[in-house]
Image (tube, grey):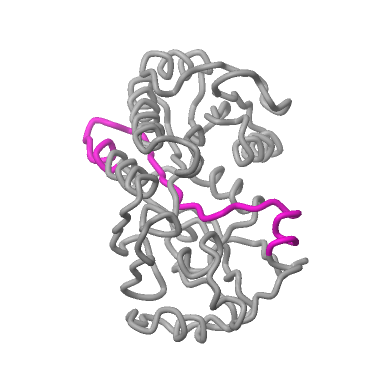
Amino acid sequence: MTLSTIAVTGGNGKIGRAILRDLADHGYETVNVSRGKRREDVADAYVTTDLLDAGETYGALAKADADAVVHMGTIPNPHGHQQYRTYESNTMSAMHVLEASEALGLESCCLASSINAMGAEHQQRPAQVEYLPVDETHPRTPDDVYGVAKHAMEVTADGFGRRPDSDLTISTLRYPWVPNEEELVESFVETDRSLDALIDDDPWSGRDVLFSYLHMDDATAVARKAVEADYDGHESFWAVAGDTTADVPTARLADEFFPEAERRADFEGTEALFDLSKAESVLGWTPGRSWRDY
């Protein structure tokens, strides 16, 4: 696969801007496809579009003349919008990007999914963890509209990936919270991450997300690796840090918070509660950054 121009939807956002910068640093021409005024100065071009309009999405990607697209232009959480708006944003925008990518003959389409596709911090029930470490085949049982929408997005990508006449490589990346360096220091380095402190669970970095996070540098790198990948159909990948948010051995975390989960492997040190081998073998990506670096 030879890529020269990559479009990023939602390039005005926090992660979108960082992805544009990473792609530029690796020699790609970039196009920010976003709604409203431009709020970054990285992309080589900017196209305004409403991703909930199928025609506008097709026209924007056609104008971008991109070889691949990273789709980050969705509502990032269930707060602040009516439930149907959140669902619409996360499912229909992905549908429009996939449809346009296939029709225009793009080589690769990378979609931002979420740990919430499994059922995580936004739902009413605790995260349902059947076995550890969690891999991509673990059951997805969300009950909140954000998680349900991310699940539906992945199912939609599955459908496009089954089409025998399509050459589109489709990736969905299951991101957790992606902090910048300032947020890492404030949230983890300067706070108590001991077992006693973690008993009072914080939903965005504690039990409900299996103590996961991802450094911004790793978040941008895995998106780049995903659009550079060349395989048939659709694949989902866990895109989380290689360690936990806890200053506690992972084996003890598992015993304390997930005693009913089947243990399929032993844990060493503070490694993540996720199996990241698929991203390594298929994408050539492994997370390299940790809050412990600070």
Q: Which residue: 51% across, 13% down?
A: 63
Count of marks overlaid on the render? 0
- Answer left or right for 163 relative to 238: left
Observer-nearest of 85 and 43: 85
Q: Where are the magenta residues, as a range?
A: 158-187
Q: Quadrant of residue 197?
A: bottom right
Q: Is residue 45 above or below residue 230?
A: above
Q: Is residue 156 above or below residue 55?
A: below
Q: Quadrant of residue 97?
A: top left
Observer-nearest of 182 and 226: 182
Residue 291 is situated, as x and y percent measured from the top left of the image, at: 69, 65
Q: Which residue: 58% across, 84% down?
A: 249
Residue 196 is situated, as x and y percent measured from the top left of the image, at: 60, 83
Observer-nearest of 59 and 149: 149
Observer-nearest of 54 and 107: 54
Q: Which residue: 45% across, 79% down?
A: 257
Residue 139 in view here: yes
* Magenta highlight on residue 92: no
Residue 272 is situated, as x and y percent measured from the top left of the image, at: 52, 71
Q: Is residue 39 above or below residue 171?
A: above
Q: Which residue: 65% across, 51% down?
A: 216
* Magenta highlight on residue 161: yes
Residue 61 is situated, as x and y percent measured from the top left of the image, at: 47, 19
Residue 1 in view here: no
> Quarter of the image containing the C terminus?
bottom right
- Answer left or right for 188 relative to 97: right
Q: Is residue 294 above or below residue 114?
A: below
